[in-house]
Amino acid sequence: MEELLLVEPDFNIDVHTEETERFVIARGEMRGYRETMEDRCCFEKNLCNTMSYISVFDGHGGQVAPHYINQHISKYISDNLKDFSFEAASLSSKTDLEARIRKSIKEIDHDLCTIVESIDERMLKQNPHHQVDESGTTLCSVLLFENKNLDIVCVNAGDSRCVLFDGESTVQLSDDHKPYNAAETNRIINAGGFLEDNRINGDLSVSRGLGDFRFKKNDKLPQEQQILTCDPDFAYFTFEENSKGERFIVVACDGLYDVMSSQDVVDYVRKALKSHPDLSANNAQEVLCDLMNHCVKDLESADNVSVVLVFIK
């Protein structure tokens, strides 16, 4: 899938900030060297009771999938988490949560497919040369449960990434879903696909995500066994109530992580915090913009870049 790059890049950053009693959030999107902006990111405060939600959607092949998922996924999640109370120490609570989130993601992926197919069918009747929608998106989300401690749940499908610093060490909460990973390769081949140049059928460089319905058409297989699946992985972390020091979460697309390692990102944020020590929304915005400008202007990332920073108070 060839991407057009601009000679004159767009370095403008669309930035939004939010502050609660427990954390400060800054999120930003930069088109950079790409002709179009296909990333989205979001934050929903108190989506369900004391649970807040952040997510990054790294789109490709068009804007339909990332835009639709960004606009609607919080409603699917809130509907499926009604009357749910998360207990980090309870295995049954984690099992219940994962089932509800999986249901939310499968439902919105199915509904997106229905909408896209309906529009394409109508457009093809009007114009036989209409190019059907082949857009897709990753999903890397963090659920923040404000209990006595701050309990973090990472939900990931794709190669966007969640990394955190707990005051002492760097923790990568998500694994990148790439076609050449053994488990992903096995599923792709078993579903009738193949790998070429480390891409699904020589086309797609990520092996999980929403949209991309041309890779989800095997009627004999469940959703999680398709060439491309939206089935996510889950990871858990707790920021203890009395823990001290710099603590933050970085959720970002591969436009950032293609040019910086997880540790590079943490080190850069920690260094930037020394110049902006107060955890205010303005300072969070400054750190975010410093990071994104460094990624695109200094390291010349050729992709869209979307980042959400969460600073724990």
Image (cartoon, rainbow, N blue to C red):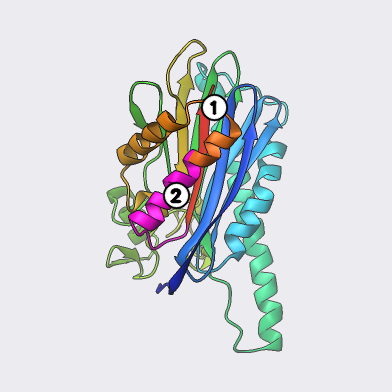
- Relative to 80, is 32 above or below? below
Q: Amino acid at mark 2?
A: Met
Q: Which residues are magenta?
A: 287-304
Q: Residue at x 67, y 78 (%)?
A: 121
- What kind of element bears circle 2? helix
Q: Residue at x 58, y 26 (%)?
A: 23
Q: Is residue 81 visible?
A: no
Q: Label 2: which residue? A: 292
User: Mark 2 Cα within 10 Å, few/some/many (few <14, many 20+)?
Assistant: many
Pick the front one: 196 or 189: 196
- Relative to 268, is 84 above or below? above
User: Mark 1 Cα within 10 Å, few/some/many (few <14, many 20+)?
Assistant: some
| Mark number displayed over residue 279 | 1
Q: Residue at x 36, y 33 (%)?
A: 271
Q: Distance of mark 1 from mark 2, alpha carbons? A: 19 Å
Q: Is residue 120 visible?
A: yes
The numbered mark, 1 or 2, whose residue comes first in the sequence reads 1
**Total numbered badges shown on the rendered structure:** 2
Q: Is residue 292 magenta?
A: yes
Q: Amino acid at mark 1?
A: Leu
